[in-house]
Image (spheres, grey):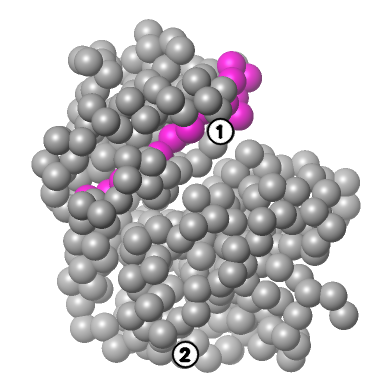
Amino acid sequence: MSNIYVIGHKSPDLDSVVAAISYANLKNKIENTDIYKPVIAGEANKETKYILEKYNVALPEKLDSLAGKKVILVDHNEFAQAQEGIEDAEIVEILDHHKLDFKYSNPIEVIIKPWGASCSIITSLYMQNLVEIEKSMATCMLAAMLVDTVITKSPTCTDIDIELIKHLSGVAEVSSFEDFGMEIFKVRSDISDLSDEEIIKSDFKDFNFKDGKFGIGQVETADLSVFEPREGALLEKMEEMIEQEAYHSVVLFLTDIIKGGSRFLVTSTDEARVEKALGSSLENKRLYIDGIMSRKKQVAPKFSEEFDK
């Protein structure tokens, strides 16, 4: 029987990578097989490598093209965010926690929950199917959920996420998920060895709106000040991306998880309408908005409303 590849989105983040690993493991255990293979769609970011290495979980291999492959998409369903060759792949299933933007010619299994992380959904499926989660796997899944929910502070975090985080904390023998979450975000805040492009694309997603292609990146940090000396260089790299990759706009927002707000860096072919979408004026391509912490729930919908009419 041919392999079925479980894969997250391009510019893979922790939830995307761990979702692929944990869901492939669950499917193999339920079906008593080994045909489900976790893979990734690009270079893993710093905290993903940190968590997987610390808890001895293998980083999946990168699959450069999905063409001709059977695949399960996790943590995304939009083709703009999928790995190359998705149009020529056989999609057998989707598991995601984002809005549904998907059309396909065949009926397939689709699991979408309005929860804070894909790993939250997968945790619930382990529990429903009475499949034990090994300690190392549970710790990685917990880490992914804490990142995606910003240690439960994100508006995307639900009561169900919190209950599942507490459950996994017990399995992982983590006494304080808050402290564990801060450990991960301190790793995310260390950008000293990252290039400008690596910072921008550490958690970056493409959106195809009617007015063009938008790239929206987010970096969550416990110390916003570390980015200040690099803002000019980051904006220059974002301008290059517009010219070289035909973006309408490239937006990077730096989220302060302590203060609960985000500093936006914006490059665009139409700054006036970006200002309209964000509801605030840019000053030298920058602005800070209090209370903004989620791309999925607070930022992408603003751009969709303005640019996808």
Residue 153 visible in image: no
Whole-percent x and y of residue 18? 49, 69
- Quarter residue 33 falls in: bottom right
Q: Which residues are magenta?
A: 208-221
- Quarter residue 195 falls in: top left
List the residue tagged with mark 2: 134
The residue positioned 54% from the left and 36% from the top of the image is: 206
List the residue tagged with mark 1: 207
Q: CA distance from mark 1 to mark 2?
A: 36 Å
Whether residues under marks 1 and 2 lie with C-beta atoms below 8 angstroms apart, the answer is: no
The residue positioned 11% from the left and 41% from the top of the image is: 225
- Does residue 243 belong to the magenta stretch? no
Whole-percent x and y of residue 242? 48, 23
Amino acid on which disc 1 is placed: Phe
Along the horizontal axis of the image, is 173 left or right of 128? Answer: left
Amino acid on which disc 2 is placed: Glu
Residue 130 visible in image: yes
The residue positioned 41% from the left and 48% from the top of the image is: 203
